[in-house]
Amino acid sequence: MDQEIQRPRLQKLIIKNFRAIGHNPVEIELDDIVVLVGPNNAGKSSILRAYEVAMSDGSKKCELTLDDFPNGTISAENLPEIVLHTIVYDNLPAEKWVNRSTGENIIIERWKWDTVGKPKRSGWNAVSQDWDETGVPWGAANVANSRRPLPHKVDAFSDPEEQSSSIVKLLSTIITNRVKSLTVKNGEEEEELTEFGKLLEQVKEIQNKIIAESKEEIEKAEEGISDLIKEIFPDYKITFDARPEDDLEKSINLFKAGSKLLMGPATGYQSTVDRQGSGARRTLLWAALRYISETSSKNERPNVLLLDEPELCLHPNAVREACRVLYELPLNSNWQVMVTTHSPAFVDVSKDNTTIVRVERDFSGEIKGTTLFRPQRAKLDENDRKLLKLLNLCDPYVAEFFFGGHSIIVEGDTEYTAFKYIAAIHPEEFKDVHIIRARGKATIVSLIKILNHFGTRYSILHDSDYPILESGNKNPAWTTNQNILNAVYEHVDPSRVRLIASLKNFEFAFLTNEVSGEKPYNALLELSENTEIAENIRLLLLSLINHSSPIPTGCLEWSSLEELFRHYQDKVMTSLQKKD
């Protein structure tokens, strides 16, 4: 993308003493897609709200109540504070506000409340390297707001009227901005949206043209979104009940505040969105986002979608489509997306523009935000992304390990099924364990790279295989053992990883039936009928959780390929002795 047409984007959001977030700042690194995961009441929604508050400077939404202060009290040592880093390319403020330490133009602003009501906004002075209380970047709040991406927040549990209002506002803003960008011209060249002020000087002469072009854009939106709605509600359509503003000279709004979005059967009664069911409202939201994504251009004003729990009220078939819409929105247009979720289906580690942040409370009760995953830091190559994409298609819940607990990578379906069975009959013993099914030996390496990025403890169980096949040919799976070991040693502290190999394979090591077309099913039968096998696999699972626990017979904890090879040599010698 050429720098001339690049638009502002968010780089970092820092929050402290705001709602559930305490004195220790929560720092969010922003990407095209930011997925906030973590338990309930950990502050995820507070993070979404923080950016909306900062961007509402100059309006009532930016005014805090006592409930927004820590513990509902005002303390000089614990005042609410929101800091925003924005990367800009044009319309720069005065030189002292521009931080170029990273090679980009970063504007750093802070909002601080010393009491209920309005905040004090200040800017970071790149010259004095301190907060400057004598002025602010870009001056007036409305001017500064126009230099940053515009927020669109949709809450999870707000009442139907608020949800309806959020969707109508989202569509109205996008349509309005597109109409403005289409009608503002200087000679033969189309002007940028930020030059829309020139329209006000000519409003008397071009008002009819603006209204005509806005109607055309509305009709296109109605038709496009109605087509998408029909995929779920076949006989439905939408009508955007928009009315022109009487006095454009005093407002940049093209439509009255009372404009409504109607929805219902094409040949029947259409009611406002707030009168629709939860499923219909969420379907409309996704249809609107998909329409915006598929019809946007990179030259539009940048936007930020702040979405709370996108999985709510979605039919299972709609979840994958909703995830696709979210991930494609930044690719097709000037959008960034920040969502909170409890669903692994909305975490796609195969994408190269996604940051995963876990928000949780520590032992002292303080909320912290930990960046679990950024592709460039995890050092994923194209083959890793390909494997992870295929894995995500096969198992949309593979990303459960982002949500906490002790992670165990296993190679195939049989061990995954066996461990799940053991965990189900011993729930207290294995209540916080995530079994990650790699569905192939090569994919284990890609998953290790991601878990290394966490810096936490985890375990791996894979088949040792043998260097030579029974046919006498070399076994390609043997080479992957070294790749797995190399990946483990890239952990910041390899001693926190336990690497265990099932000797030859899991079925050979722990079950009685090695070769079968129904291996997972046969494993369940054996576990349910043979208490000795079940106990052996329980001990194996315990050893994968507790790295100091002994491992059962049938597997080997290894740290060099020579160890595995010695086992193979022992097996060959034993076989020869039996033949003799």
Image: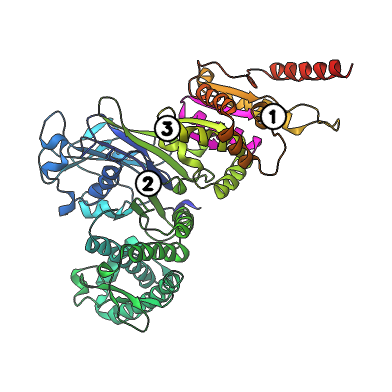
Residue 480 spot, x, y in % from top left: 69, 30
**Which three-letter amino acid code belongs to the residue tagged 2?**
Thr
Q: Closer to the camera, 257 or 547? A: 547
Which element carries disc 1, helix, strand or loop? helix
Q: Which residues are magenta?
A: 434-462
| Cα gap from disc 2 to disc 1, whole angstroms | 40 Å
Residue 393 visible here: yes
Quarter of the figure that contains the C terminus: top right
Q: Residues within 10 Å of mark 3 (few under 14, many from 20)?
A: few
Q: Which residue is mark 1?
A: 508
* Side of 563 where 176 appears, left or right: left
* Side of 515 where 87 appears, left or right: left
**Which three-letter amino acid code belongs to the residue tagged 3?**
Pro
Q: Mark 1 or mark 3, which is nearer the start of the sequence? A: 3
| Cα gap from disc 2 to disc 3, whole angstroms | 25 Å
Q: Mark 3 or mark 2, which is nearer the start of the sequence? A: 2
Q: Which residue is mark 2?
A: 341
